[in-house]
Amino acid sequence: MVWSSFSRPRGVWETVPVTDSPALAIFDLDGTLIDPAGSITGGIAHALKVHGLPVPDAATLSSMVGPPLLESLHRVADVPGEVLDAIVHTYRKRYISQGMAEGRPYPGIPDLLARLRSAGLWLAVATQKPQGLAEKLLRAHGLDQYFNSIHGAPDDETRPPAPDGKAGIVRAALTTNHAHPDRAVMIGDRRHDAAGAAACGIPCIGVAWGFAPEGEFAALDLAAVVVDAAELEDAIAVVLKTAAASPAPHAASTATAREGAAC
């Protein structure tokens, strides 16, 4: 369901105020920029089969895209703790050898990123995929050139997920790019993206082409839900213009932002 849609006014980017703080768009990766084309769900199913464990149904597998893999395997697929590391190793081996190549940027995304950069926006990635894999995936599909910074989870996936979920990764994107929360927006396809954005005082735009199960967006305080790259471009412009003119109630103060976008 689309809650907000945007017509495309001529010169829309000219209406976004210019300040000392860069206007920053922070993107999730899988399900937002890149369509894994079954490489994640298929890879998880493969790893579970190899280790003789039951494979969840398709809907359950799709729900595992977004959170940290270790967390999804344990909480969603009920994988015993003693075999988690082995399953992650099997999954990553397959993903690196063939999974990354199976994915594709979603329609219109490369052109959108190019236009946003040309318009003067700063772009970052905040993903719960391991940092090194995120960089490799973006490079494999020619998208790394558009981003000022890329932020992911630790490469050592045997470490427990961060207790603050995605908030720390979003915070790193804000701090690295010296962006005030009232000059930033998160774009993602799952509740984890919205939660990370809210914890850092920035609005979140939901993309309808990702992995959110039916009804998930309805429970979230999203600035907009968009159905294609054209709507996303307009939504980013409108959200950043609105936030700069009148910061949302949940946005962090300027003083807080200057202290490193703490959240």
Image (spheres, rainbow, N blue to C red):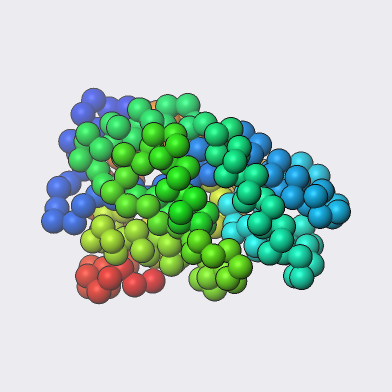
The reply, left or right, for residue 101 in relation to residue 241 is: right
7 relative position to 193: left or right: left
In the rendered view, would you say 128 is above or below 206? below
**Which image quarter: residue 103?**
top right
- On-image quarter of the N terminus: top right
Compared with 137, 253 (above or below) is below
- On the image, the x and y values in percent for residue 202 come to 37, 58
Residue nearest the viewer, comparing 93 with 144: 93
Residue at 34 percent across and 35 percent down: it is 113
Q: Position of residue 85 (x, y in %)?
A: 68, 64
**Residue 89 in view:** yes
Q: Position of residue 251 (x, y in %)?
A: 34, 63
Q: Is residue 106 above or below residue 242?
A: above
**As drawn, is 258 to the left or to the right of 252?**
left
Q: Residue at x 66, y 56 (%)?
A: 89
In this rendered view, identify the residue nearer to me: 240 or 7: 240
- Where is residue 112 drawn, in percent x and y? 35, 31
Q: Residue at x 62, y 51 (%)?
A: 92
The residue at the point 23 percent across, 61 percent down is 178
| Quadrant (top left, top right, bottom left, bottom right) of the C terminus | bottom left
